[in-house]
Amino acid sequence: MFSYYGTKKKLAKHYPKPLHDIIVEPFAGAAAYSMMYYDHNVILCEKDEKIYKLWKYLQSATEDDIMKLPILEKGVSLNLPEYKDNYRIEEIYLMGFYLNPGSSQPKKSPGTFCSWNESTKKKIVEDLPKIKHWTILHGDYKQLDNIEATWYIDPPYQSSGGQYYHHGNKGFDYQTLSKWTLERRGQVIVCENLGSDWLDFQPLINLKGQKHNRMEAIYYIENNIPQIEIPMITKQIQVEERKLNIDPNIQIIKKDLTVSTSVKEEDWFDILAKEL
Ligand SMILES: C[S@@+](CC[C@H](N)C(=O)[O-])C[C@H]1O[C@@H](n2cnc3c(N)ncnc32)[C@H](O)[C@@H]1O
């Protein structure tokens, strides 16, 4: 619903279709993949407060809110009091992203390729009802629950290009993201440039740029059921003992039990009880 640096708007149709009703985009940006399958139960998470606020604004905006927004002449700035004093900060962001399409931050003045015009406003209005039922969260991707879903994971690129976001690739821990990604339950789709090394990426599509060509890459697992060890198993069993009324003097010797994350946490009790 807004123009954004690194958006997958043109590429969204090349990724596998969602196999689950829930789609999670832990690195939301302009969420082009979710927009394509907007009627799903979409969960967005975004660390950049401006992007988060813009989504929340769009979710509650009315046709009038959008249609009343002014069209800017070349040379004027959204910093002028007539704009900044009369419009919400989210409206300034929305207009700003269209003033210079493909930017990672909203701009203040119309650029050469400005696409903020009446037909853009009408297109946004058409899209408003599509996102009303979405869940939009502000924060870090790691805070998300590991639900069974279609996980569309599009972080800042590890290599060139990923540095332009407010929260970009500088200091970003790709090894932690790699481990976290492999633990996701369900369908896992990951976007990167070919050559990035934090997962085994495969070529998806060759993109022709003005100066250079580059290969968009994908890492894909259709039905990920990761095997994890129950953390701090001894402590876990002590809790179970009370719940199951097992004699606390019973010595627990089985410490290396592993369960699939497809098992719900509450079902662990039953599995442990059978093992004892
Ligand atoms: C490549 S863009 C996503 C583009 C999106 N797929 C689209 O179609 O527009 C990556 C996004 O991740 C956000 N981001 C960076 N670090 C993050 C983190 N730790 N948690 C959540 N979002 C983060 C950036 O602010 C940026 O908006």
Image (cartoon, helix red, strand yellow):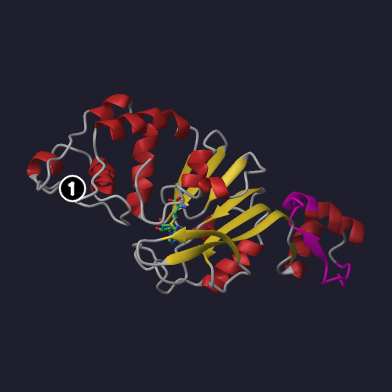
**Where's residue 32, x and y in %?**
46, 46
| Quadrant into which the N terminus falls | top left
Residue 260 colored in magenta in the image: yes
In the figure, is residue 76 to the left or right of 182? Answer: left
**Where's residue 36, x and y in %?**
51, 39
Residue on which the image places disc 1: 110
Instruction: Classify the position of ligand 1 by quadrant: top left, top right, bottom left or bottom right.
Output: bottom left
**Where's residue 225, x and y in %?**
74, 57
In the figure, is residue 199 to the left or right of 264? Answer: left
Q: Nearer the viewer, residue 9 or 158?
A: 9
Q: Residue at 25% of width from left, 31% of height from top? A: 118
The chief SS type of the magenta part is: loop
Circle 1 packing at 10 Å, graded few (<14), some (14-19), many (20+), is many
Q: Amino acid at mark 1?
A: Pro
Magenta residues span 249-267
Q: Nearer the viewer, residue 194 or 125?
A: 194
